[in-house]
Amino acid sequence: MKNTPFTARHQALGAKMAPFAGYNMPISYTGINEEHQSVRTNAGVFDVSHMGEFIVKGEGALDLIQRVTSNDASKLGAGQAQYSCMPNEEGGIVDDLLIYCLEPGKTYMIVVNAANIEKDWNWISARNTTGATLQDISDRTALLAIQGPNATKLLQDLTEGDILNLKYYTFVKGTFAGVDNVLISATGYTGAGGVEIYFEGKEENAGRIWDAILAKGIKPVGLGARDTLRLEMGYCLYGNDIDDTTSPLEAGLGWITKFTKDFTARPFLEKQKAEGVGRKLVGFEMVDKGIPRHDYVIADETGKTIGRVTSGTQSPSLQKAVGLGYVDVAHAALDTPIRILVRDKALAAKVVRVPFS
């Protein structure tokens, strides 16, 4: 297993560690519910240095990104970021990702999921027919997500940039906690506000930044709470809610699928949009007592299988069980009654809007 620059610090804090995407990662420190509420009500810091980062630069950089991703990266100006995905030839999703514009038309950073680093690198490299320069900086890049309604207030005096007024999906570069060349991005995977910071993962940099953040009273949070936080918002997790077999239209990601440009599987997805999808990713909440889990069967009221759960949990904020799953489109309307098969019991649930409330 690989370690991040913060692994020793997680262990010193008594974190529960476990393998994740080939890395030794903290799952929780004081408990998922407590860490979850810290982020929702104040602020928490996540080590997400396992994520992958690629630099794409040169005259062919934008052309390559446009062809392999579904969103329109030509709209990005310097200091702007964008959520997107890479479709495969059959309209499934190779990965979902973030694109950072460092220099319009010339230099970009792509941030990919940890488990997909090699797969994504190979996918993009195989389609680099325009002479773009590709650089995998994953192993030397550290990434911390400081999330929560008070995150930027607590962090502001650690940097000279105005992060209090940083607009969503924009970023600045500068000094943070005395470390140079830190990219501070108004993005995150919790729906609670805050920033993500990228920097060269030298041990001295990592220690200085981590200690400065904790000195502000910001609690460390593990991947367990990261999952419950993202699920409450209805955010997709690659490998659960989206994968190589799910199209962005089925997953409710039509808003990042732009048919104003050419990209992989555009004809397939245009046809799917025109004809309509056969299944949809929906949010649901349990009516009966029980917690839905990945791959549980979803049935209609007659007991007929209509889909499967992709993610589920007991929501710490809402104190009820919620989940995501694909269902036949005939059963995807809000308030549709459904059944979740939990240990062979058909428990009542209903389709609801996300974010969950």
Image (tube, rainbow, N blue to C red):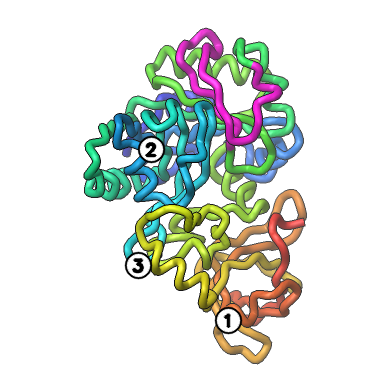
User: Is tag 2's residue or tag 3's residue first in the polypeptide sequence?
Assistant: 2
Q: Residues within 10 Å of mark 2 (few under 14, many from 20)?
A: many
Q: Is residue 356 above or below residue 40?
A: below
Give the image location of residue 213, x and y in percent. Answer: 60, 19
Which residue is depicted at the point 57% across and 67% down? 281
Magenta stretch: give its range.
162-187
SS for callout 3? loop
Q: Nearer the viewer, mark 2 or mark 1?
A: 2
Q: Is residue 140 magenta?
A: no
Which residue is depicted at the point 68% across and 87% down? 301
Q: Is residue 207 above or below residue 339?
A: above
Q: Residues within 10 Å of mark 1 (few under 14, many from 20)?
A: few
User: Is tag 2's residue or tag 1's residue first in the polypeptide sequence?
Assistant: 2
Q: Nearer the viewer, residue 236 or 343?
A: 236
SS for callout 2? strand
Residue indicated by mark 2: 52
Residue indicated by mark 1: 344
- Are the residues at dot 2 and dot 3 in contact (C-beta closer than 8 Å)? no
Give the position of the N terminus as an image quadrant.
top left
Left or right: 58 as drawn, with respect to 238:
left
User: Is tag 3's residue or tag 1's residue first in the polypeptide sequence?
Assistant: 3
Q: Nearer the viewer, mark 3 or mark 1?
A: 3
The amino acid at mark 1 is: Asp
The amino acid at mark 2 is: Gly
Left or right: 281 as drawn, with respect to 136:
right
Label ID, residue 90: 3
Give the image location of residue 328, x and y in percent. Answer: 57, 79
The amino acid at mark 3 is: Glu
